[in-house]
Every structure is written in C-alpha cells, then in structure tokens.
Image (cartoon, rainbow, N blue to C red):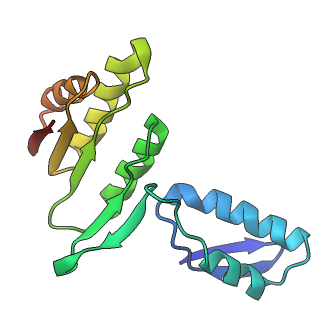
Amino acid sequence: MSNFVIRGQKIEAASRLLGLHQIGPLAAAAAIAFELGLRAAEIERGISKTRPFEHRLAPRREEGGVVTIDDTYNGNPDGARAAIEFLRSVEARRRIYVTPGFVEMGERSRAVHEALARELALVADVVVLVRNSATPHIARGLTAANFNGHIIWYD
C-alpha cells in the first residue's frame, strides 16, 4: 500500500509494482492525474491496476508457497540495485539471486560487477552465476566480500 498526499488530497493506493523505487513514478502519475481533473478514487483505481512489465521485478507464486521474482530482463546496474534492495526487504528462509551479469559494460565490467557482488554478499544466500565473461568478476567480488552463501555456476 502506498500513501501520497497531493494538493491536500490523500491517495491510498495498492500497486502491484515491487520496490521502493516505484513510489516516485507512482506519485508523479497521481499528481499529473490530479492536474488532468481525475478524482482521488479514480487515481487509486488506476494505480491498483499497475503491474510490472514482463521479466522486470515480476512476482510469481509457485507450488509450496515459493515466491519467485522474475527480473531476468534487468540489464543495468541501477535495476540490479533496485532488485537487490527489494530482495533485502523480503522476509524469506532463503534468498537466491540468479544473474548473467551485464555483458555490455566494456572496460568498467570488473568494477561494476565487483560492486554488484558486494551488495549481493549482504543479501543473498545463494548466487547462481550464468557463465560468461562478466560473471567471474561477480564470483571474485563475492569471495572478496567474504560471502557466506553458496555460489552455483550455470552453463
């Protein structure tokens, strides 16, 4: 549930979008809707219909109560940070993060992936690395960050 106060009007809206980074865009959309003359109830109804794009922090309920967050189309460090921050907020027995890294980072690849690894080391219990040119940097970064979980390589 997200609550906003825009121009003295309280909006209480439940969106299906995940992550704190979504609040700003939802609040901006609500402000624009007010400017266009929509009432609070209409805005709340509209926000309640928001859903993530396919493969972008999209939750799925699996058998046995397992919740999978599909973020497989995430291809940038900012998006990964948002996903990791969301993962941190989830109460779970085990947090598993699967990543191929970012294959188009050029000469920044090592630094970007080691930074990703430092963040993952604080949150994940298992990191599954899809083997490519980027993921060895993540593995080294996890090791350097004293990651206590498991690293699984996937070809």
Please name the residue shown 21% across and 67% down the image. 92
Q: Is residue 28 left or right of residue 61?
A: right
Q: Position of residue 26 (x, y in %)?
A: 66, 64
Q: Is residue 151 visible?
A: yes
Establish if 59 lies above or below 151: below
Q: Where is residue 9 in the image (x, y as percent from the top left)?
A: 79, 80
Counting labels gives 0
- 115, 57: nearer the viewer: 57
Establish if 47 lies above or below 138: below
Image quadrant in which you'd find residue 61: bottom left
Establish if 53 lies above or below 116: below
Q: Is residue 151 left or right of residue 60?
A: left
Q: In this view, does 112 lie to the left or right of 121?
A: right
Please name the residue shown 26% across and 21% down the image. 133
Going by the picture, which residue comes out furthest to the bottom? 41
Q: In this view, does 70 lie to the left or right of 50?
A: left
Q: Position of residue 54 (x, y in %)?
A: 48, 59
Q: Is residue 123 visible?
A: no
Establish if 27 lies above or below 79: below
Check the picture and name the quadrant holding the C terminus: top left
Going by the picture, which residue comes out furthest to the front? 155
Image quadrant in which you'd find residue 115: top left
Q: Where is residue 124 in the image (x, y as percent from the top left)?
A: 21, 50
Image quadrant in which you'd find residue 120: top left
Please name the residue shown 56% across and 74% down the image. 15
